[in-house]
Amino acid sequence: QMSVGMAYNAADFLTLNAELEQTSNIPLNLKLAAVLEYDEWIIRGGLNTQNQFGLGGGYKKNKLQVDIGLGIHQVLGVSPALNLSYVL
């Protein structure tokens, strides 16, 4: 697998991401995503050329971060995710 990507800070609150990924025997996959940040709140969304879509959000306070998200795949359906992080 090979991939190359970039991130662009369009504004203080907005980051745009793009990635090209090549895995053997699978067509080239283009991934696009956006991250919005407002105070402690974060909203994320993205899609790719393999018919996948993701949406999520999070809350960051001091060293604690809570994230929740959904991955939506045309064949596999919905995959929920929950993450709790604490930085030491």
Image (spheres, rainbow, N blue to C red):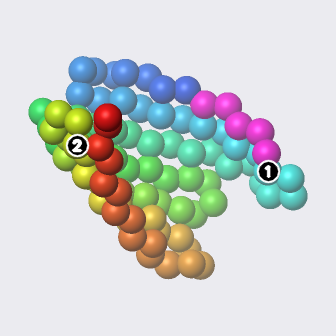
Nearest to viewer (mark 1 / mark 2): 2
Depth check: 14 or 86 in front? Answer: 86
Residue kind at label 1, given as amino acid type: Thr
Residue span colored magenta: 1-5
Q: Are marks 1 and 2 in contact (CB under 8 Å)?
A: no
Residue 15 visible in the shown view: yes
- Coordinates of residue 29 in the picture (x, y in percent): 68, 49
Depth check: 45 or 67 in front? Answer: 67
Disc 2 target residue: 64
- Coordinates of residue 56 in the picture (x, y in percent): 32, 55
| Residue 5 higher or lower than 2, as above or below | above
Q: Residues within 10 Å of mark 2 (few under 14, many from 20)?
A: few
Q: CA distance from mark 1 to mark 2?
A: 35 Å
Residue occupying the point 38% across, 40% down: 34
Question: Mark 1 or 2 closer to N-term?
Answer: 1
Image-based side of 17 in relation to 14, left or right: right
Q: Residue 34 got which mark?
A: none
Disc 1 target residue: 23
Q: Main secondary structure of the magenta part?
A: strand
Residue kind at label 2, given as amino acid type: Leu
| Residue 43 higher or lower than 40, as above or below | below
Residue 38 visible in the shown view: no
Which residue is the extreme one toward the left? 39
Q: Residues within 10 Å of mark 1 (few under 14, many from 20)?
A: few
Q: Quadrant of residue 31?
A: top right
Image-based side of 3 in relation to 10, left or right: right
- Coordinates of residue 18 in the picture (x, y in percent): 54, 35
State yes or no: residue 52 in magenta.
no
Image-based side of 61 in relation to 18, left or right: left
Residue occupying the point 17% across, 34% down: 62
